[in-house]
Amino acid sequence: MAVDERRAAAAVRELLAAIGEDPDREGLQDTPDRVARAWGELAAGYSTDIGDILGTTFDIEHDELVLVKDIELVSMCEHHMLPFTGVAHIGYIPSSNGRVTGLSKLARLVEMYGRRLQVQERLTTQIADALVEHLDARGVIVVVEAEHTCMTMRGVRKPGSRTVTSAVRGQLRNPATRAEAMSLILGR
Ligand SMILES: Nc1nc2c(ncn2[C@@H]2O[C@H](COP(=O)(O)OP(=O)(O)OP(=O)(O)O)[C@@H](O)[C@H]2O)c(=O)[nH]1
Ligand SMILES: [Zn+2]
């Protein structure tokens, strides 16, 4: 489902009026449409098909960890509709039948699940579960580190605080394998 930009623009116009602004003053005239287009990007993840991302695999024998670190993340918190930004680290041990995905597809998963209204825990879990379900990965580790603007620019106002979440599946739950993956993730 694509974003209904006309409806979004009407809502933004209402919001401008609600905060005491004049939606018709010169500087704001195009703002509702701009914000609606911005939400078209920020909510694009709802209309992404996971089959388009993980449908192509390569037959490569690799029974050890594949890890992509520091994948930039932008998402919108579902509680305040404010951004949270940071990085995701995604590691997996491919299935025994050699279903290895392209490295960029791991970053595309971050885009797909990030460009929605989210909580960080669910975003982390969805990425991990997608790799188990669609690639039959033997093990998965996903670590997300993010700063939530709902905690920095409003509310409790604690700039610099970072939230770290992880989701670990299959063979990566084994303490030794997990520790190895974590040291690769945390070793900058
Ligand atoms: N678990 C979790 N909480 C989040 C996330 N993003 C924002 N929150 C929290 O959601 C909570 C919403 O709490 P409420 O008490 O309903 O809302 P609020 O009055 O705006 O809360 P404050 O932010 O404390 O002012 C806050 O504690 C936020 O920090 C997230 O990704 N995961
Ligand atoms: Zn929030």
Image: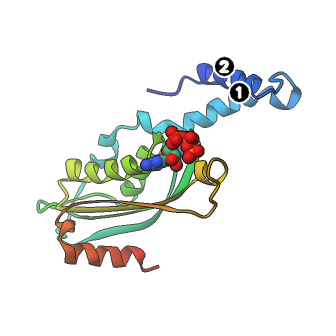
| Badge 2: residue crowd in 10 Å (few <14, some 14–19, many ≥20) | few
Q: Answer whether residue 75 is visible to the viewer in this image.
A: no
Which residue in the structure is indicated by mark 1? 32
Residue toward you, 130 or 122: 122
x then y, percent, for residue 67: 34, 69
Lateral position of residue 108 relative to residue 11, left or right: left
Question: In the rendered view of the protein, which quadrant contains the N terminus?
Answer: top left
Give how far across and how far down residue 175 sits, in percent. 20, 74
Question: Pointer 1 and pointer 2: residues touching (CB < 8 Å)?
Answer: yes
Q: Position of residue 19 (x, y in %)?
A: 76, 29
Q: Label for residue 58?
A: none
* Residue underneath mark 2: 10
Q: Nearer the viewer, residue 104 or 127?
A: 127
* Amino acid type of the residue that numbered disc 1 sits on in the rendered structure: Pro
Q: Is residue 75 above or below residue 185?
A: above
Residue 157 falls in image quadrant: bottom right
Q: Amino acid at mark 2?
A: Ala
Q: How many numbered tags mark residues here?
A: 2
Query: Which residue of the protein is positioned furthest toward the right in this rendering?
Result: 26
User: Does any portion of residue 152 appear in the rendered image?
Assistant: yes
- How much space separates mark 1 and mark 2, taking CA atoms? 7 Å
- What is the x, y in percent for residue 155? 63, 47
Q: Which numbered disc flags the more N-terminal residue, 1 or 2? A: 2
- Location of residue 34 by image quarter: top right
Q: Secondary structure at mark 1?
A: helix
> Residue drawn at (52%, 27%), measured in percent from left and top?
3
